[in-house]
Amino acid sequence: MELDPVFLSRVQFAFVIAFHILLPALTVGLASFIVLLEGLHLVKRDPMYLRLSVFWTRIFAVSFGMGVVSGIVMPFQFGTNWSRFSESGANIFGPLLAYEGMVAFFLESAFLGILLFGRKLVPPWAHFFAALMVALGTLFSSFWILAFNSWMQTPQGHVLTDGRFLPESWLAIIFNPSFPYRLMHTVTGFYLTTAFAVLGVTAWHLKRGQHVAESQRVLSMTVTFIAIFVPIQVVLGDLHGLNTLEHQPVKVAAMEGLWETQSRAPAVLFAIPDEAREQNHLEIAIPGFASVYLTHSRDGVVPGLKSAVAGDRPPVAPVFFGFRVMVGIGLLMLAVAIWGLWLRWRDRLFTTRAYLNACIAMLPAGFIAVLAGWTVTEVGRQPWIVYGLMRTRDAVTPSVTGGDVLVSLLLYLIVYAVVFGAGIFYMAKVARGGPPSEVELRDAKLAERPARPLSAVDS
Amino acid sequence: MQLDLVPVWTVILGVAVFMYVLLDGFDLGVGILFPFIRDEDSRSLMMSSVAPVWDGNETWLVMGGVALLAAFPTAFAIIIPAVYFPILLMLLGLIFRGVAFEFRLKVTDHRQRWSASFCIGSTVATFFQGVVLGMYVQGFAVTGQTYAGTSRDWIAPFPLATGVGLLFGYALLGATWLVMKTEGELQRWAQRQGMRALYGVLAFIAMVSLWTPFINRQIAERWFSFPNLAWLSIVPVVTAAIAYATWRALRRGGDFVPFIGAMGLFAMCYLGLGISLFPYVVPYVLTLWDAAAVPASQTFMLIGTLFLLPIVFMYTGWSYYVFRGKVRGDIAYH
């Protein structure tokens, strides 16, 4: 059997990026959370925030380390497996990656050392500054990499000459139509992923009656956070969807599972899309509802998959189901947020075991939603690597064989399973340990000045 | 008229790659030396000496790769496919090396496991970086604008030899770094390792210097024709002088000179390589100008680079300043 290097390269890219994106999903949010905790400690002088910061910094360190090593793999993928894309597109995306490196990666990595190891070596304000720079670095990184990704989705600002994309307007390239929506939606998604991870770990400690004071404070903070940001994310998701409808209607048709272009389009709740027959099986739908939320008008016309020839359609099932998983988790998150607010109003937030159990169960929810959303937008972009302009199958490295990619894919699978399996195990171990106690903190932080045990906290 | 930015980008790319080789060189070198010391507490101290900076150091690899991609896309699209497996194995090595820093601190009873991960990762990553270097000097099979060879072309005497050579090179950087950062018994051990690595480095410098002129006639002509021979002979003379200074400092116990000397040796090798290969970016096929990105892309990046790289150097410098001096076992972690 002939191994297809295009298909295997896609599987490999999907695998390494799916694994990688889980780590920024946590580190982007945790970096900002650590800044918040460090800032609160500086302002309020409450050592509890310092203990919490130390705790979450330990988890951050493991996930950041894994994020770095899995991230370095990414730019090389463009060379090893997608060299035709590099050859034709690098005049556009090369500078965007270069800016990501110079603005974000150096900032994160240089200040990370001080964040992790410098607490005793620099004054508290400098340590806070380092935490802030790391957090800014993660956000700058999201900015540039999503500008690149969005350009692949909604390309503009270039001219196509002899098969190469050449820049015409950098502002148009960076601020392409889908970029603001994608950036907001993704970063909010990362923040919520972190919030639910924090919520889950905290609820777990609270349920077991350990680290109670710290856990109550964090639980309260996090419930406030998700009560604000889950509704915002729902709105942002809607706006992103409308933007996709405008620029990538076929992707929306796949998300909705709609084959025919129609007004009063139904909202398909569940179906099994059949690409060969161009129809759905076992469909459950609300008549006319998709037109309402997609066009904000009852008679609005929603394009169907058949508006594109079969060769220009994305694989329907992954996009269709990915979208339902993402939205479903979003609704669950909304429920957890509302329930949390209600329990706090009734003063039962910390004592309702069912709620704590729900928070624990929702710990991985954000990660699943991120992967599902990523699947929707990336598989939905197919068969194009640059939407409407360059096909994925024309982007693969000509010299690479199916056998080569199979070997590299297997090696990535094995190594990631071993290494990142261990990483998740160690993160769970640190999480189970909870925030350090006061005594440990003094030993670790104030060993230099035992005569004035509170000096680092006071200064 | 559009200003020719290719020389500027050549310098930036050259600096990025050289920064990577020097900085991650000593991190990786520390890992390469692990098999020669059994004591896990000494190993902890060795890792602590690079733990706060390794991530920043590794970032130069991304910068080098991305600078090649962005400023010379055609070269990137030819070279990286040609070293498909060396790059893959280097990346996997870097993964095992990188995660070991955090994982090793999280365990009490399996420290050796992550020491092994650190050591094997460092060694594999280094060896395959050397293979990439060897492939690069050896040259690639190119048809038009694409790589026309196979994914196994790196299995050849010269790339494998440079792979081993780089192991000695990074080991030298790592050992001399440890001479600078440690004291007492560990420092004396590092001096002995540095001496061994230095002999290996010198042997490989000699071997590669004699080998490369046979790989390509242009290289031979560049070095051995008059009047080049006269003024280029400075390169081996200076290299020999630096090697002697490093050797002497390792014997007499200087703290800083061995590391500076090791960096000097790398600088001279890098210079020699540049002299051999200029103006090619894909050796013997495409020049820097053939493979360059369009001026609009190079200009857009340059504006940011001229502003950002100095800032990067400033705060990287600050980070090194914070962790200056001999490494301490009691640095509060997190």
Image (cartoon, rainbow, N blue to C red):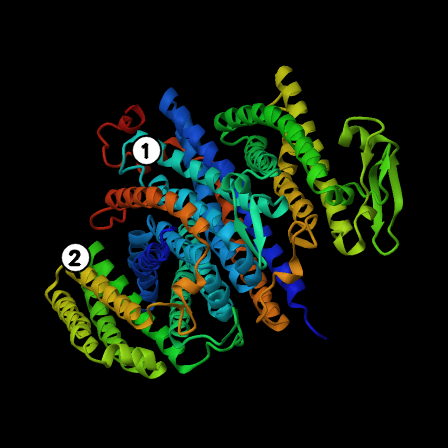
Q: Residues within 10 Å of mark 2 (few under 14, many from 20)?
A: some
Looking at the picture, tell me which residue is in the foreground, B217 or B248. Answer: B217
Is the residue A355 above or below the residue A285 in the image?
above
Figure quadrant of the C terminus of chain B? top left
User: Where residue B48 appears, x then y in whole percent?
Assistant: 31, 52
x 73%, y 44%: residue:
A251
Residue to which mark 2 is pinned: B256
Can residue B29 be seen here? The reply is yes
Residue A296 drawn above or below residue B3 = above
Q: Say which residue appears at 33% left-offset and 61% top-offset.
A: B21
Nearer the observer, A50 or B261: B261
Residue drawn at x 42%, y 43% is A104
Residue at the extreme front: B1
The residue carrying mark 1 is A442
Residue ID at (49%, 31%): A211
Give the chain of mark 1: A
Coordinates of residue B125 in the picture (x, y in percent): 41, 65
Is any atom of residue B182 visible in this view?
no
Which numbered mark, 1 or 2, is in the foreground of this view? Answer: 2
The CA distance from mark 1 to mark 2 is 35 Å
Q: Chain of mark 2?
A: B
Tell me residue B241's x, y (percent). Answer: 13, 70
Q: How many residues crowd mark 1 within 10 Å: few (<14), some (14–19), many (20+)?
A: some
Q: Is residue A363 shown above or below B182?
A: above
Q: Is residue A33 left or right of residue A358?
A: left
Estimate the x, y position of residue A271 in percent, counting from the top left. Answer: 84, 44
Q: Which labelled disc corresponds to residue B9? A: none
Q: In terms of image quadrants, where is residue A238?
A: top right
Q: Work out whether residue B100 or residue A18 is closer to the camera in this orientation and state it.
A: A18
Q: Amino acid at mark 1?
A: Arg
Q: Is residue A4 above or below residue A303?
A: below
